[in-house]
């Protein structure tokens, strides 16, 4: 909850600093996730994972501040990410499970851009993101309970391009600031030990937005 409060305070402070003359645009944003899942813990040494994909979509709003190049955008996105994890089950057989998160992600980005005439402009952006997970917990190979955290905090850093004031292309890296879930093993692959492996979802994101 502390992360949620921090994010809301940051977002509110940014919005309150916007002058009344700020130009507001509403739109729709969507794109692809290229997931990089990281695992921690030494209980399961031969657990392997493959980078996978996902997607996000939802409404967005942009505030163009009357300070040259400065703007703020915020979105409410349905965000889905998946990774395939491979390991041995209790009988020593190799097995693969798909780990999928489904969440409501709320990114707030501060951006600074440079105009390329009346046709387009490019911009850099960065900002915090809070996400609320509603994916179901997963049973891995019958020997582990994979539990997702109800919320997580991350940071976005990227660049983009706006074309004809309506179409926007973005590319960014979403950096998780903590674990997004953990697996509690009742039998670590080939041993009778127990333990916990934490997971962290980082993601490259490629997106397209249209502002009305």
Image (tube, grey):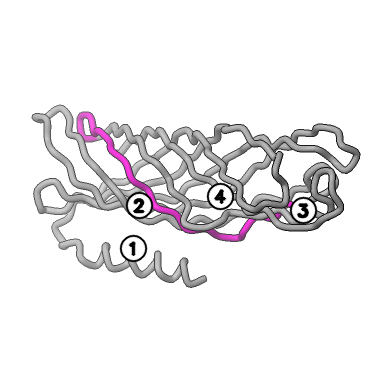
Q: Which of the two marks, 2 or 4, is nearer to us in this view?
A: 4
| Residue displayed at 61% across by 38% down | 82
The percent position of residue 3, horizontal first and vertical second, equals: 46, 67
Contact between labelled residues 4 and 2, with CB atoms less than 8 Å apart: no
- Looking at the rendered structure, the number of numbered marks drawn on it comes to 4
Contact between labelled residues 1 and 2, with CB atoms less than 8 Å apart: yes
- The crowd level at tag 4 (other Cα within 10 Å; few <14, some 14-19, many 20+) is some
- The crowd level at tag 3 (other Cα within 10 Å; few <14, some 14-19, many 20+) is some
Q: Name the residue under label 4.
A: 200
Contact between labelled residues 2 and 3, with CB atoms less than 8 Å apart: no
Mark 2 or mark 4: whose residue is earlier in sequence: 2
Q: Residue furthest right?
A: 91
Q: Work out which quarter of the rendered image holds the C terminus and state it.
A: top left
- The crowd level at tag 2 (other Cα within 10 Å; few <14, some 14-19, many 20+) is many
Q: In terms of depth relative to the viewer, which is nearer, 122 or 166?
A: 122
Q: What element carries label 3?
A: strand
Q: Which of the two marks, 3 or 2, is nearer to us in this view?
A: 3
Contact between labelled residues 1 and 3, with CB atoms less than 8 Å apart: no
The percent position of residue 112, horizontal first and vertical second, equals: 19, 46
Q: Mark 3 points at which residue?
A: 145
Q: In terms of depth relative to the viewer, which is nearer, 194 or 53?
A: 194
User: Where residue 11 is drawn, which disc sits there?
Assistant: 1
Q: Does the magenta stretch include residue 152?
A: yes
Q: Distance between the residues labelled 3 and 2?
A: 34 Å
Q: Mark 2 points at which residue?
A: 74
| Residue displayed at 17% across by 55% down | 22
Q: Give the range drawn in magenta.
A: 145-165
Q: Which of the two marks, 1 or 4, is nearer to us in this view?
A: 4
Mark 3 or mark 1: whose residue is earlier in sequence: 1
Q: Is residue 81 magenta?
A: no
- The crowd level at tag 1 (other Cα within 10 Å; few <14, some 14-19, many 20+) is many
């Amino acid at each position: 909850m502390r992360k949620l409060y921090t994010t809301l305070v940051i977002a509110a402070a940014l919005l309150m600093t916007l002058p009344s003359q700020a130009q507001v645009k509403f739109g729709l944003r969507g794109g692809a996730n290229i997931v990089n899942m990281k695992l921690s813990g030494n209980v399961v040494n031969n657990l392997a994972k493959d980078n996978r994909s996902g997607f996000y979509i939802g409404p967005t709003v942009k505030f163009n501040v009357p300070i040259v190049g400065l703007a703020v955008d915020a979105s409410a996105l349905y965000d889905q990410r998946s990774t395939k994890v491979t390991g041995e089950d209790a009988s020593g057989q190799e097995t693969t499970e798909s780990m999928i998160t489904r969440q409501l992600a709320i990114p707030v980005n501060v951006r600074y851009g440079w105009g390329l005439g009346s046709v387009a402009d490019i911009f850099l952006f960065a900002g915090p993101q809070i996400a609320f997970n509603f994916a179901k917990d997963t049973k891995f190979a019958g020997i582990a309970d994979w539990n997702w955290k109800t919320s997580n905090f991350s940071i976005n850093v990227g660049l983009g391009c706006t074309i004809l004031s309506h179409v926007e292309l973005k590319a960014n890296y979403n950096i998780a600031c903590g674990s997004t879930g953990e697996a509690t093993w009742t039998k670590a692959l080939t041993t009778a030990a127990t333990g916990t492996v934490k997971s962290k979802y980082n993601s490259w994101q490629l997106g397209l937005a249209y502002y009305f």
